[in-house]
Amino acid sequence: MKRSLTAFLALVTTLFGGAVHAQQVEGIAALVNDYPITTIDVRNRMRLIIVSSGVQPSEQDLLRIQQEALRSLIEETLQIQAALEYDVEVEPAEIDAAIANIAVQNNADPSQIANELAASGVDISTLRRQLEAEIAWQIIVSGVYSNRIRISNEQIEATLERVAATAAQPQYRIAEIFIEIPLSADDSQAQQRAIAVMTQLSQGAPFQSVAQQFSDAPSAANGGDIGWMLEGQMRPEVVQIARILQPGQLSRPFRVPGGLMIIALIDRRESSATLQYQLIQATLPASRINDESREDFADAVSRIRSCAGIDAALAGVDGAFSSNLGDVSHDALQADIADRLSSLGEGENTGLLDTSAGLQVYFVCDRTIGGPGVPSPDDIERQLRNQQLSLLARQWLRNLRRDATIEIR
């Protein structure tokens, strides 16, 4: 007799520890553009999620896991269908490499992964299908959108300025789980997914494994680990939460643009980043200062828009000269000068300073940050590009699901 999907999946709790019985009847859980997702597919994906978490779910947990398994299978089917449309074929060696990467993350080897899955009644093909969809989707998203993304120098500079402003703040190593809320939907489904995530984590499931199965962020492939971050690289909402967490602690779900996020603070360290300025100093010696020269010097300084124009502007001021100070650390400067420089950008100056040497002005020709964990301009560009690519990928997948014919049975 054919069982309903709900009744069939209710058996997962008792069947979890053993192999699949031959007499179980395969049914259709959903049709995605006429492609069937079977009840066997759903059960196997549920088993994969459960095995990955390492916890024994309650009956209520199973319902949430069932919903997550079906949702992910529908999205993966859409991704594979898109790959076929673009003639993208994932080679078995690429899937093997992905499994090897998972093994490394879990201090194991690929054969151990396959054996552990088999011992829990999960065929390795279940994991391979999931990885095939992920790899294919990455290929087509990159192929379709990479050349359309333009990261301007202004965007990079703005991010570097935020990083510079927080260079002295602690650095955080964070793992994330992002749960998307579609623009056209309420947040009830996302809230249910967040509950499923928090339930598994509270029962001791490894954050890395839960992120790999539930997170909608690109970092899911790395178990949610996004590495060391400065506050200037992070969303303001994430910074606010990270500041109050202790290493090893986990946040509750919180809202960010586009969805819900859960973070784990892996570690925190004091920043050893240093802010460096490339400076030129303009001086009107004390012996040459009078009312007229002071006015001329101030007028010349007001006309300077870049370091390249300093000498030309000072040429008409009797006795004035410039000195290239090269790279100077923020910490090596006098406190009053450092304070004036801290908010300045390239080409800007401190204004006139009365010193024992006379009238002086410091021009910022460049400012950079150095030290462990500090991103380079290339790193910033890569981060901004990946953020845009991720956003476009999620929008595309939403559109595929909206336009698809999906029948859930």
Image (spheres, helix red, strand yellow):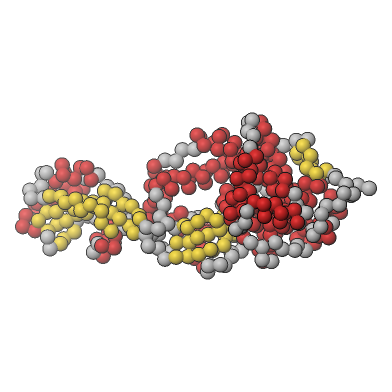
The quadrant the C terminus occupies is top right
Of residue 37 and residue 344, the one placed in the foreground of this image is 37
Where residue 34 sits: x, y (%)?
Answer: 78, 35
**Nearest to the observer: residue 58 or residue 356:** 58
Residue 179 visible, this angle: no
Residue 11 rendering spot, x and y as whole percentages: 84, 56
How many numbered dots are placed on residues in this image?
A: 0
Q: Residue at image x 68%, y 38%?
A: 80
For residue 173, side relative to residue 90 (left or right): left
Residue 253 appears left or right of 327: right
| The residue positioned farthest toward the left in the image shown | 287
- Compared to 120, does 38 lie above or below? above
Extreme residue in the right direction? 1
> Who is closer to the viewer here, 401 or 370?
370
Q: Position of residue 305 (x, y in %)?
A: 24, 44
Q: Quadrant of residue 337?
A: bottom left
The foreground one among 254 and 373 is: 373
Task: Identify the residue shown where x is 39% and y is 42%.
Answer: 153
Evaluate whether residue 185 shows in this view: yes
**355 horizontally vs 168: left or right:** left
Image x and y of residue 89, in percent: 64, 34
**Which residue: 9% across, 51% down?**
293
Q: Which residue is located at x 64 percent, y 51 percent? A: 110
